[in-house]
Image (cartoon, rainbow, N blue to C red):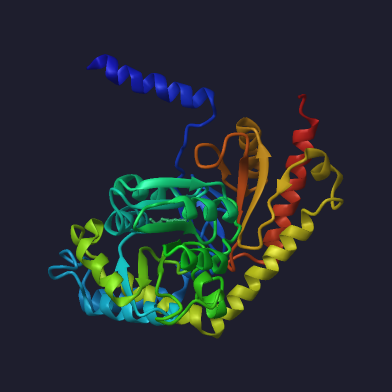
Amino acid sequence: MMSWLDEFDEKLATLDTQSLRRRRREVVPEQGARLCVDGASLLAFCSNDYLGLSQDPLLREAVHAAVDRYGVGSGASPMVSGHSAANAALERELAQAVGLPRALYFYAGYATNASIVPALVGEGDALFSDALNHACLIDGARLSRATVHRYPHADLARLEALLAASQARRKLVISDAVFSMDGDVADVAALHALCERHDALLLLDDAHGFGVLGPQGRGTLAAAGLTGAQASRRVIYMATLGKALGVAGAFVAGPDSLVEWLLQKTRSYTYATAAPALLAEAVRAGLRCVLGPDGECRRQQLQAHIAQLREGLAPGSDPALDAAGWALMPSATAIQPLVIGDNDAALAVMAVLREQGVWVPAIRPPTVPAGTARLRIALSAAHRPADIDALLRALRIAAAATTAMPA
Ligand SMILES: *Cc1c(COP(=O)(O)O)cnc(C)c1O
């Protein structure tokens, strides 16, 4: 037994030597996008709170009112007594927002994907999965015991060939709509067309698109015009509520019969305590904001920040940045990854930024492919233009410091 425990220590030591040990920081929110991190005030570019709703007064008020009415916990599974009137209202509003017949509200995104995939397909069925899909889709695929065909990231020609070659009776294509570590957007219309042609279902994970992309922030499916019962009859849309919506949780939306099936067969839904009404009410307040003029204004601010950052990092804008050879990925979303390459180098850059009072997380394998360690810069409407300037200044200093280091 002891030798087994010793093994953990050895493996942890290996993570250290590879600069792969992950550490948490204790944070307390401050004004705007600032965080107090282990006691120090930092300007943060870490959060998926793309519209700045997590600190919004309207959401706070909604929570206070919900606590007065419902109390704190939901007390049971939604299949017993946990399905509050607030949760039910949220489901109707989410379905309407994405233009699909029906929605199901979950307490967490990870659990949603990990358990809806096994509810949809099983042994003998075929799954087609983008190589850069989120871990929870991958875990759902494994749990399902369906045959998994992994296609290279965004390679729709390869996906088509795999679909055409498959003899499986039921085929499910699973894809992130916005890829969480690259920031690029899947070609949803083309994916959908392939699914039509090969009689497959499409599961789209829009964790990073819902609230920010599409008309009124209704997400990537709405952006592709795939709304209404007919247009979306082979689509299962999934999005999370802890990112642009600023709260926590997730939902699945799609055809009536399919959502009813998921309600019956998704184990993380049936066998888990329902999300508390206070969260549902917070999401409802967030959704009202997202769909209204305030949401539009926040999305415009976010777009302006994206343009400002990309302009500031464009080749030729700074000699030290050019010399460092970092590559800003071609992303149009709030996720702006700057690829450094080496794990240690990415950590060193992160450390220099931190000395400058700026916090950008370094993302390393296995979250991203080996050799592509990166700074995942996440922008938010909570930032001010001066914050983007501060980040650019810190990056120039870090680039100068890096290129000055002996190789
Ligand atoms: C964050 C994320 C999830 C998980 O959602 P949680 O609600 O945080 O559990 C799922 N898929 C993608 C693409 C994500 O980025």
Identity of the residue furthest to the bottom in this view: 293
Query: 389 above or below 255?
Result: above
Q: Where the C terminus falls, by quadrant?
A: top right
Asked if residue 159 is positioned above or below residue 72 in the image, the reply reads above
Question: Along the line of sight, which residue is nearer the eye, 3 or 351?
Answer: 3
Say which of 240 and 247 sits in front.
240
Residue 169: quadrant of the picture:
bottom left
Q: Quadrant of ligand 1?
A: bottom left
Work out whether residue 215 or residue 316 is closer to the camera in this orientation and state it.
Answer: 215
Q: Quadrant of the N terminus?
A: top left
Q: Residue 200 location, x and y as percent?
A: 42, 62
Residue furthest toward the top? 3
Q: Is residue 78 left or right of residue 36?
A: left
Image quarter for residue 237? bottom left
The residue lying furthest to the left in this view is: 80
Between residues 14 and 130, which one lies in front from this camera angle? 130
Q: Residue at x 62, y 31 (%)?
A: 344
As drawn, is 268 to the left or to the right of 58? left
Q: Is residue 229 above or below residue 5?
A: below
Residue drawn at 67 percent across, 47 percent down: 338
- Residue 347: image x %, image y %? 61, 36
Please tell me which residue is depicted at 55% across the width and 69% down the height of the picture: 189
Residue 44 in view of the camera: no
The answer to whether residue 68 is visible is yes
Taking 389 as reference, is 382 left or right?
left
Q: Residue at x 77, y 46 (%)?
A: 396
Q: Which percent across, then down, holds residue 368?
A: 55, 42
Q: Position of residue 28 (x, y in %)?
A: 46, 55
